[in-house]
Image (cartoon, rainbow, N blue to C red):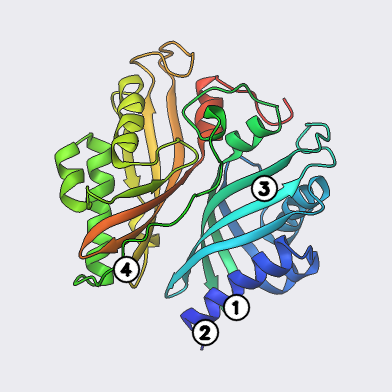
Amino acid sequence: MATSHDAKEVIRRWNNEGWSGGKYDLAYEIIAPVMTVHGAGGQAIGMGPDGLIDLIRTWRTAFPDGTMSIDDIIVEGDLVAIRNTWHGTQTAEFYGIPASGKWVDVTSIGIDRVVNGQVAEGWGELDMVGMMQALGAFPMIGPGAVANGKSPLWGPDSTVTGDSPTTPEQNKQILLRFIDAISRGDRQALEQVTNVFCYLEHNPVWGAETLQGGIQVYNQLRAATPDLHFEVEKDIMIAEGNQVAAHSIVTGTHTGAEIFGVAASGKQLKWTHSDFVRLVEGKIVERWVSADVMTFFQQLGAVPSPGG
C-alpha cells in the first residue's frame, strides 16, 4: 500500500529527474494516463503524460541549463504540496519570445495528488508575469518583485523557531481564518492569527514582504474589485507538522478603482492562488504566496497572452 512518504518521493523524482534532468520518458511511469491539470500559471497544458512532456520540453528547450530546485515539500495522505524555483538562461524561443540570453528565477507552488505511485491531479501557480517582465516581454507594471526591481526569489527564511501547541488540523483552521480575513479585509482578524512582531511574507507575485505589505496589496485589489473573494478548496488542504498549504479560487468584478493602468471595466475576474505557511506557538510567522497573476492581468487587459 502506498504511503505519504511514497507520494512525496514521486514528486521529488518528477522535479529532479523530469524538470531538472530532462528525463521525459519518466512521465509514462509516474504521470497517470488521465492526469488532470487544474492550473499552471496561465499556461495551456494537455492532460496526461504527453501534455506534461510537452510542457517540460517547452521549458527545457528554451532554458537548456534549467534546473528546478525543491525549496520545501509537505505531504498529507495522497496530497503533496511543494515550493519550487526554476532557474535558467533563455537561449531559445519561449512562448513567442526570441532568445534573450537572460537568466531567470521563477518561484512556484504546486499541489499534486499521487495515487498508486502516479500523479493523478495537479494544481499550480508560478510567477509567470515576473518571468515575462524579466525577459523583456511585458511592461514593468504591478506591485510584483520584478516590476519593482526586487529579487524574484523567495528570500531568506525566517529565523523564528519554537514549538507549536496546535495540531495539523488546528493549523488548517488557523490558515482558513487567515485567508478569510484577507478575503474580507479584516486587519484585526489577521493580527489574531499571525505573530505581528516577526511575521515574514515571501510573495514575489504581489511584492509583499511584511504583513502590512500584504494588507496593502489586497486593499488595492479590493479597491478595484469591491466584491473580492477567496474560496479555499478545503478538500485539497495539506498540513504536516507546523506547515499548511492551501489552494484558493479568487474572484472579483472590476467595478471600482483603476488598477495597473486599467480603468474600471466591469469585467468579472477569476484566478487561482496558493498559500504555504509555517506556524510557531499557534501563530503564522511565515507565508509563501504564488498566484496565477498572468490570468488576472490578461483578464484585466493589462498584458497580452504569451506569444500574442
- Circles 1 and 4 in contact, beta carbons < 8 Å: no
Tell which of 32 and 239 is nearer to you.
Answer: 239
Task: Tell me which numbered mark, 2 or 1, is placed earlier along the sequence.
Answer: 2
Residue 210: quadrant of the picture: top left
Q: Which residue is drawn at the image coordinates 57% and 57% (left, top)?
A: 84
- Circles 2 and 1 in contact, beta carbons < 8 Å: yes
Report if residue 32 is visible in the image.
no
* CA gap, disc 4 and disc 2: 24 Å
Relative image position of residue 269 (x, y in whole percent): 44, 28
Q: Amino acid at mark 4?
A: Asn
Relative image position of residue 94 (x, y in whole percent): 78, 38
Residue hosting label 3? 45
Relative image position of residue 150 (x, y in whole percent): 53, 35
Residue hosting label 2? 2
Residue hosting label 1? 117
As displayed, is residue 4 above or below residue 202? below
Placement of the C terminus among the 4 image quadrants: top right
Q: Is 248 on the left or on the right of 65, as rendered?
A: left
As displayed, is residue 299 above or below residue 208? above
At mark 1, the secondary structure is: loop
Task: Tell me which numbered mark, 1 or 3, is placed earlier along the sequence.
Answer: 3
Q: Which residue is drawn at the image coordinates 33% and 57% (left, top)?
A: 234
* CA gap, disc 1 and disc 4: 26 Å
* CA gap, disc 3 and disc 4: 33 Å
- Circles 3 and 4 in contact, beta carbons < 8 Å: no
Task: Tell me which numbered mark, 1 or 4, is placed earlier along the sequence.
Answer: 1
3 or 4: mark nearer the eye: 4
* CA gap, disc 2 and disc 1: 7 Å
Residue hosting label 4? 242
- Circles 4 and 2 in contact, beta carbons < 8 Å: no
